[in-house]
Image (cartoon, helix red, strand yellow):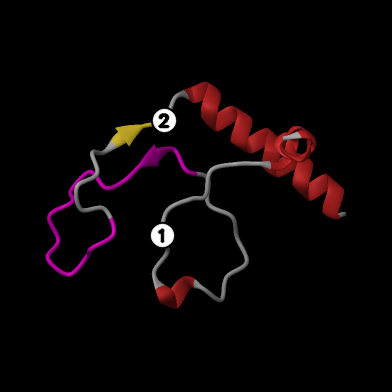
Amino acid sequence: MKNIEVLKDYLFEIGPIRPPNEGKDCSLLIRINRYCPYNRCLFCPFYKGKKFEARKLEEIKKDINAMKNLQDKIK
């Protein structure tokens, strides 16, 4: 449990799923919502049974700060 406390400044929610052709880009997506607002595509199994929801602004700000802290530590 103590290890989680040490890492809390670097933890953030993983962003949306990216198409495979975008995998070569080195970028970090910020997750502002969860799941898919459409969720009716027959070819996509990722969000079946999951209800779309917008994240709270405070959660998003915490993620941005965690990403910044991690970037600073890496540099």
Q: Is mark 2 on a helix, strand or loop?
A: loop
Percent of width and height locating residue 46 = 28, 59
Residue nearest the observer in this picture, 4 or 27 = 4
**Residue at 56% of width from left, 76% of height from top?**
24
Query: Can you identify the residue that label 2 sits on?
Result: 55
**Residue at 23% of width from left, 43% of height from top?**
37
Question: Could you tell whether 63 is left or right of 35 in the image?
Answer: right
Q: Measure the C-alpha gap from mark 2 to mark 1.
A: 16 Å
Magenta residues (range): 31-46
Q: Is mark 1 on a helix, strand or loop?
A: loop
Percent of width and height locating residue 66 = 69, 38
- Amino acid at dot 2: Arg
Residue 28 numbered tag:
none
**Residue at 80% of width from left, 36% of height from top?**
6
Q: Which of marks 2 and 1 is nearer the N terminus?
A: 1
- Amino acid at dot 1: Ile
Image quadrant in which the N terminus is located: top right
Question: Could you tell whether 42 is left or right of 63 in the image?
Answer: left
Decide: is 74 above or below 64: below
Classify 10 Å Cα crowding around label 1: few (below 14), some (14-19), many (20 and above). few
In the rendered structure, are the residues bearing label 2 and label 1 in contact, judged by CB atoms less than 8 Å apart? no
Residue 17 numbered tag:
1
In reply to whether residue 32 is colored magenta, the answer given is yes
In reply to whether residue 5 is colored magenta, the answer given is no
Question: Could you tell whether 11 is left or right of 18 in the image?
Answer: right
Q: Quadrant of residue 56?
A: top left
